[in-house]
């Protein structure tokens, strides 16, 4: 019996020790796959601008099947002017880089592409090399408002979260193919009622170097809330939704819905600069035709699980108080959540969701009285970045750069405006709004933390928002592991 | 006419026997004219003895011969010497006698009388009786079977004078043989090229062919120790073991006495015949005969000229009536089989411990086992294979065709990725076995594995427990605990086939080992044939376990050592058991250890490098569900109480459990290389860990066995019932609920796991390759993973672990030109920088490029859209696909072969063990084993 008890104690002790303290130690290991590092030259960086707005064609601008360009748009470019590079597309003769940054402006009457020709193929790409955008203050009878959009690097997939085909609202899907390869487009359209099963969503042809305009109402009628997934095969494209509002008999408000990032559980939207909130409230109360004159969060939940969302709107100063939305968005549908109660001030939004969602915010500016107007802009979640990014600033209007630091520590950033560099400290989970100098590009240079930024443009009270992007092709050191 | 006799004694270093022999010669009632002892030994004792013998009389003489002379040479020399100076050979007879025999007083007289009575009798032989037991006839005349196999007419039978009627025989043993000197001279004595055991028969046949008679004289008796046949002489005496000598004798008789054409055909067919003989011997469970049979066949094949020199023109027709009849052969076989069965029963009676209870062992079916299995099938409903193939988790489909599956199994060149000369994973043999069950669609059987995993694991555990206890109330719940254990459930849900197959195999392996070693209660082993079946089954299961879970190899080695010790040091049998596993694993181990220079890689799990986390022992034992996991821990703690019981074996099983846990701790501390073929579609990290399931199941089965022994030993029924109830409610029920509710991570679908157009082209014989590219991590990292997929597709049987650990996969060195070229190609593709890519695409034979759906790959698609060498095909369920425009002009051919030397050896070993494992019916055995049984009874078993 004594032996059995001793055995019991020994085995119990050993087993218990093994289970309790049995965390394996990595004493030995086998090799890790090491990739090969290769220096590759890049494809020339190209960005394409959508061009001026489209208005209905026909003699009296009443056609619903044909569209024509209206007036011209103003494009703004910032080109680093690196030596051994040149900019093509700005003028008949390529602009040669000579080591000094150049901020350029050009009126465009159609879709336009700007390409940085790089003889070496080794010049680092990104917004530091070339960044462009376009704005157009439309004042036609059929379209009024400020339309702002970035000029994009052609891609094969886009998510456009914004727009409406409700009564008096027109959403045109503008698909441009700046490449020399024909492209075939497939669309997925989501509304507040779910996925559209309309005919003609696939196999839409966009010939090489052409633009195709599609009225969204031909796919979905009277949809209050739109989200569109665009996928191209063949040549890469750019895609926007040109959204406008006709309130009664007059046009009132327009913007481009720019491509949004991929669905994610967290999204940060800087640049919620609220002005004229009292006017906006008056419009909203005045008539049903102003029902969408309010700030709103739009969410599309892909998949089959509803999203539980918290959207915090935070003020950038101690004087501005935000609000919080705690909502549930239904899976597979697009839902708008009004953001009410915001006084004039500068804000930014932080969205948290338990499942990945696509989101955007509608920002509204209004004024009543003799010079009454109302305009809106769709703002997408911003991309976080830790490396320098540049954005061209239009010469017209007032532009403000809203830079957010989401981390729990303050961070320093440097802003390059023309030849000057200014330094700012952004508090933890805070946003800094920096006024831009018209016509002078801005470079945002983070120090140690990731920051996010949007540029808000105000021309005579009309509003447009531009994202701070960093378009680049793959180049430099590429790591490849072949299996 | 009165005969004169010259005695010739052939001596070989047995002085004590020789002395008695010489004394017996001196006492013969018939006068021996001259005695000559030919001695081939160099022992002083023998020399002194012979000197003394010679000094007694001038009629005695000794001829000392060099030791290496054969019996035929010795006898020829001695007889020649003994006849020297003698005249009138017609009146002289030579009495040839071995030193290990004692002729009775009238032995020679009776023999001489036989010669005197009939002038036609040329050779007369005495009845050979036992040296110690003179009532036993050890031999009385020789003949051959119809196939010219030596056949002893009487063998180890009690002498009741039942054979005293015998007279004419085909041949006789050389011991005690009295032969006329003139016949001897005419025949030229024994054939000098014939093997020892063929020489007697050859002499008899030739004597008969001269028209003389060969007879046995039952009234003449010689005691014979048969030292050569008992293996008590130096093996050189017979030219090897007795069995080898007998096999050589058979081959010699066939080649020298069959008609020339038949002999030639026989010689030509010896290689094929060897294969058939080996298969037949395996089927009748006589693997002990394989080696010398092959050796004898080789000997005959390469010494055919010597056999042919021994041919004579005379026909066998005249002597055929003296051949052994079929009835004699069958009777001998039956006697041998019954003798063997008696021996085994006796051994079982001595070895099997006394039954612990009076309860009768109920069969699996009678104990309701089938109903429990049916219940387990219902609990596995989510794994019901409604479609052909399993996908997701660890699983990939098998190759669609059995031939492709066979080609990938045991191959020496891996047609994956960049290609590698390396052995396939040993696990591919397991896949081949499963796939072969439904050879027309290998994936069907594979899909069913997950569905039947729990029932088979339960069945195996039940059978194992049946060697421990007779009580169904213990076997059923404990076997269920094994089947429901979280580690098995997790492996099943993840489609981790190697781990699942190991968990199924383990209890069957232990059960089989218990049967082979005759451990445990209620052994059903009744014969050596059954023992061999269990040994072979154990060996095959051991190979399956080793191939499925290399991480458990250290524990399997420990198991083999423990088995060898417990089975009373039968290391040879243990070696036989581990041989198939060694054959499968050896080339792989050599490659990993010496070519990949990574011995640890041997322990890595086979199949794809599925991302897995390091687990500590507690997590590994508990599984994913922390609450239910404590029920599992509780059961193990419950097993500790068994140590307090007075029950034999509990401590041993717990030691094995502790060793398993220690192995698990060690293995979980090794991060293994990730990546490799098939990994690009997975979220595979750079390092992965071995599945803990095999070693957890090793621990669990040991503890369950300990609990079984403990509870079975309890004499108080009430206490046992309470303890079982506690274990069922507190442990089994939560485990069962958890198992049934664990969602499957695998899904069933069609076998296709690559874009349809690529697979269709591959099936049409186009060997173009698919380049799959994916971004790793954030887009700005600019790090890409690429994988070349060959036309044989992304299949479980084509995944190579050796490739995963090879420099092709691991190293960043640009020593491999193809790898460097593809790396550069990928970098140019992803940057779309306008370089001419056709040369690189052509060199690598790439026809399609696929960008996976992974996050961050949209930029890749943009780049590839602008590559002029590519045409976008479209979006597939696996990602975006492009076709290389110029691929029609590429000439690529993967000349995959079905055979390799390694594979042939492995297949040969496995096939041999399968034959050995197959149960053989007594009827078939008695038919097939006649010849083998005759060999046994021609002489006494060598090993005795």
Image (tube, coloured by chain):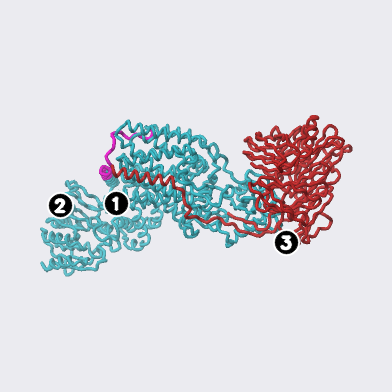
The residue pinned by badge 2 equals: B219
Q: Residues within 10 Å of mark 2 (few under 14, many from 20)?
A: some
Is the residue B334 above or below the residue A387 in the image? above
For marks 1 and 2 on the same chain, the one whose residue lies earlier in the sequence? 2
State which region is magenta.
Answer: B342-365
The Cα–Cα distance between marks 2 and 3, rounded to whole angstroms, is 114 Å
Chain B shade: cyan
Membership of B31 in magenta stretch: no
Dot 1 and dot 3 residues touching (CB under 8 Å): no
Q: Give the red chain's letter.
A: A
Membership of B347 in magenta stretch: yes
- Residue B843 is left or right of residue B292, and the answer is right
Q: Tell which tag, 1 or 2, sits nearer the viewer.
A: 1
Considering every residue shown, the one lying at the far right of the view is A59
The dot on residue A120 is 3
- Residue B77 is left or right of residue B749, and the answer is left
The answer to whether one can see residue B931 in this image is no
The one nearer the camera, B112 or B102, is: B102
- Residue B403 is left or right of residue B702, and the answer is right
Q: Tell which tag, 2 or 3, sits nearer the viewer.
A: 3
What residue is at 32 percent from the left and 60 percent from the top? B311
Considering every residue shown, the one lying at the far bottom of the view is B85
The answer to whether one can see residue B205 in this image is yes
The chain letter for the residue carrying disc 2 is B
> Dot 2: what SS?
strand
Dot 1 and dot 2 residues touching (CB under 8 Å): no
> Can you give x and y, in whole percent of width and height, for residue A341 in the image?
73, 34
The residue pinned by badge 1 equals: B935
Q: Quadrant of residue B420?
A: bottom right
The Cα–Cα distance between marks 1 and 2, rounded to whole angstroms, is 27 Å
> Can you give x and y, in whole percent of width and height, for residue B738 in the image?
48, 36
């Amino acid at each position: 019996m004594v032996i059995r008890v001793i055995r019991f104690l020994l085995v119990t002790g050993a087993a218990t020790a093994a289970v309790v303290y049995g965390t394996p130690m990595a004493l030995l290991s086998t090799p890790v796959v090491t990739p090969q590092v290769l220096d590759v030259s890049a494809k020339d960086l190209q960005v394409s601008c959508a061009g001026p707005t489209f208005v209905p064609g026909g003699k009296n601008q009443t056609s619903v099947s044909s569209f024509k360009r209206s007036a011209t748009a103003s494009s703004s470019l910032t080109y680093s002017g690196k030596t051994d590079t040149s900019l093509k597309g700005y003028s008949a003769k390529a602009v040669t880089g000579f080591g000094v940054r150049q901020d350029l402006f050009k009126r465009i009457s159609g879709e336009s592409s700007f390409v940085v020709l790089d003889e070496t193929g080794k010049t680092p790409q990104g917004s530091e090399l070339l960044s462009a955008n376009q704005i157009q203050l439309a004042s036609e009878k059929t379209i009024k408002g400020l339309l702002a959009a970035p000029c994009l690097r052609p891609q094969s997939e886009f998510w456009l979260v914004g727009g409406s085909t409700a009564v008096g609202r027109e959403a045109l899907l503008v698909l441009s193919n700046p490449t020399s390869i024909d492209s075939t487009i497939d669309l997925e359209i989501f509304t507040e009622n779910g996925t559209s099963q309309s005919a003609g969503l696939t196999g839409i042809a966009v010939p090489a170097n052409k633009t195709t305009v599609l009225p969204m109402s031909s796919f979905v009628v009277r949809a209050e809330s739109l989200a569109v997934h665009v996928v191209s095969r063949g040549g890469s494209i750019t895609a926007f939704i040109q959204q406008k509002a006709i309130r009664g008999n007059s046009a009132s408000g327009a913007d481009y819905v720019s491509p949004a990032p991929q669905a994610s559980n967290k999204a940060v939207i800087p640049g919620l600069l609220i002005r004229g909130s009292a006017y906006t409230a008056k419009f909203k109360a005045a008539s049903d035709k102003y029902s969408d004159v309010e700030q709103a969060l739009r969410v599309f939940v892909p998949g089959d699980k509803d999203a539980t969302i918290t959207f915090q709107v935070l003020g950038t100063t101690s004087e501005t108080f935000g609000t919080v939305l705690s909502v549930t968005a239904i899976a597979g549908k697009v839902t708008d959540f009004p953001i009410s109660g915001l006084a004039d001030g500068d804000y930014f939004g932080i969205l948290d969701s338990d499942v990945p969602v696509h989101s955007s915010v509608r920002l509204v500016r209004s004024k009543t009285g003799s010079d009454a107007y109302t305009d809106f802009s769709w703002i997408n979640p911003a991309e976080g970045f830790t490396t320098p990014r540049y954005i061209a600033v239009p010469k017209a209007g007032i532009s403000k750069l809203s830079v957010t630091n989401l981390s729990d520590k303050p961070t320093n950033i440097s802003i390059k405006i023309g030849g000057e560099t200014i330094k700012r400290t952004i508090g933890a989970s805070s946003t800094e709004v920096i006024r831009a100098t018209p016509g002078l590009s801005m470079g945002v240079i983070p120090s140690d933390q990731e920051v996010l930024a949007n540029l808000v443009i105000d021309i005579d009270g009309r509003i447009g928002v531009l994202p701070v992007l960093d378009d680049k092709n793959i180049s430099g050191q590429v790591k490849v592991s072949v299996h | 006419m009165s005969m004169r006799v010259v005695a010739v004694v052939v001596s070989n270093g047995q002085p004590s026997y020789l002395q008695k022999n010489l004394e017996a010669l001196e006492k013969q009632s018939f006068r021996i004219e001259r005695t000559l002892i030919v001695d081939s030994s160099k022992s002083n004792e023998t020399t002194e003895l012979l000197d003394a013998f010679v000094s007694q009389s001038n009629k005695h003489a000794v001829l000392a011969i060099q030791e290496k002379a054969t019996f035929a040479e010795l006898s020829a020399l001695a007889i020649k010497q003994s006849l020297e100076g003698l005249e009138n050979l017609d009146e002289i007879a030579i009495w040839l006698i071995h030193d290990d025999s004692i002729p009775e007083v009238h032995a020679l007289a009776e023999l001489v009388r036989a010669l005197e009575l009939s002038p036609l009798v040329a050779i007369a032989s005495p009845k050979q009786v036992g040296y110690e037991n003179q009532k036993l006839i050890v031999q009385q005349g020789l003949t051959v079977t119809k196939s010219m196999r030596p056949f002893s007419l009487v063998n180890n039978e009690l002498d009741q004078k039942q054979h005293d009627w015998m007279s004419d025989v085909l041949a006789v043993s050389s011991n005690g043989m009295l032969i006329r000197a003139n016949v001897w001279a005419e025949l030229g004595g024994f054939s000098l090229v014939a093997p020892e055991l063929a020489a007697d028969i050859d002499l008899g046949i030739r004597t008969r062919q001269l028209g003389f008679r060969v007879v046995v004289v039952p009234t003449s008796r010689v005691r014979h120790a048969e030292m050569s046949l008992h293996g008590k002489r130096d093996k050189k005496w017979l030219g090897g073991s007795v069995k080898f000598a007998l096999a050589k004798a058979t081959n010699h008789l066939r080649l020298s006495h069959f008609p020339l054409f038949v002999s030639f055909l026989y010689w030509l067919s010896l290689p094929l015949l060897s294969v058939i003989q080996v298969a037949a011997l395996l089927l009748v469970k006589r693997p002990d005969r394989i080696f010398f049979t092959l050796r004898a066949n080789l000997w005959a094949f390469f010494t055919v000229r010597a056999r042919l020199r021994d041919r004579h023109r005379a026909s066998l027709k005249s002597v055929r009536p003296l051949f052994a009849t079929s009835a004699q052969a069958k009777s001998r076989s039956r006697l041998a089989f019954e003798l063997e069965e008696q021996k085994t029963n006796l051994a079982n009676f001595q070895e099997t411990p006394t039954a612990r209870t009076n309860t009768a062992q109920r069969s699996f079916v009678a104990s309701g086992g089938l109903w429990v299995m049916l219940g387990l099938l219902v609990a596995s409903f989510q794994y019901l294979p409604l479609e052909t193939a399993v996908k997701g988790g660890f699983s990939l489909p098998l190759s669609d065709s059995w031939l492709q599956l066979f080609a990938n199994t045991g191959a020496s060149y891996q047609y994956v990725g960049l290609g590698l000369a390396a052995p396939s994973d040993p696990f591919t043999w397991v896949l081949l076995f499963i796939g072969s069950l439904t050879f027309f669609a290998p994936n069907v059987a594979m899909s069913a594995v997950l569905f039947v995993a729990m029932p088979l694991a339960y069945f195996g555990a039940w059978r194992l427990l049946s060697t421990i206890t007779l009580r169904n109330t213990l076997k059923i719940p404990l076997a269920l605990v094994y089947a429901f254990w979280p580690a098995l459930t997790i492996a099943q849900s993840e489609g981790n086939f190697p781990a699942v197959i190991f968990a199924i195999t383990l209890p069957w392996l232990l059960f089989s080992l218990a049967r082979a070693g005759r451990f445990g209660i209620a052994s059903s082993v009744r014969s050596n044939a059954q023992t061999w079946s269990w040994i072979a089954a154990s060996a095959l299961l051991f190979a399956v376990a080793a191939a499925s879970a290399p991480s458990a190899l250290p524990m399997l080695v420990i198991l083999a050592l423990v088995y060898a010790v417990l089975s009373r040091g039968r290391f040879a049998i243990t070696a036989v058991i581990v041989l198939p596993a060694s054959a499968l694993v050896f080339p792989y181990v050599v490659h990993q250890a010496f070519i990949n220079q990574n011995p640890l890689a041997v322990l890595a799990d086979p199949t794809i490098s599925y991302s897995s986390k390091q687990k500590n022992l507690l997590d590994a034992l508990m599984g994913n569900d922390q609450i239910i996991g404590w029920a599992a821990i509780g059961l193990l703690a419950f097993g500790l109480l068994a140590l307090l019981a007075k029950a034999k074996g509990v401590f041993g099983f717990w030691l094995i459990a502790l060793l398993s846990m220690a192995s698990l701790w060690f293995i979980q501390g090794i991060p293994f290389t990730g990546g490799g073929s098939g990994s690009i579609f997975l979220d595979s990290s750079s390092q992965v860990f071995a599945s803990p399931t095999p070693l957890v199941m090793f621990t669990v089965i040991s503890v369950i066995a300990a609990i079984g022994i403990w509870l079975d030993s309890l004499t108080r029924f009430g206490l046992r019932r309470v303890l079982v109830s506690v274990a069922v409610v507190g442990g089994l029920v939560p485990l069962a609920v958890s198992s049934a509710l664990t969602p499957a991570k695998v899904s069933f679908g069609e076998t296709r796991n690559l874009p349809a157009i690529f697979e269709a082209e591959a099936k049409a014989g186009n060997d173009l390759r698919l380049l799959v590219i994916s971004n790793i991590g954030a887009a700005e990292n600019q790090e890409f993973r690429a994988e070349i997929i060959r036309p044989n597709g992304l299949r479980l049987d084509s995944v190579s672990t050796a490739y995963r650990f090879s420099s092709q996969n691991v190293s960043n060195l640009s020593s491999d030109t193809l790898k460097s070229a593809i790396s550069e190609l990928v970098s140019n593709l992803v940057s779309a920088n306008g370089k001419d890519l056709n040369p690189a695409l052509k060199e690598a034979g790439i026809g399609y490029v696929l960008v996976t759906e992974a996050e961050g790959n949209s930029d890749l698609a943009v780049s590839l859209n602008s590559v002029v060498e590519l045409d976008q095909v479209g979006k597939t369920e696996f990602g975006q696909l492009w076709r290389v425009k110029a691929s029609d002009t590429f000439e690529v051919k993967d000349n995959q072969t079905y055979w390799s030397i390694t594979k042939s050896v492995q297949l040969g070993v496995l096939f041999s063990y399968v034959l050995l494992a197959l149960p053989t019916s007594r009827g078939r055995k008695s038919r097939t084993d006649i010849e083998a049984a005759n060999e046994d009874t021609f002489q006494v078993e060598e090993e005795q």
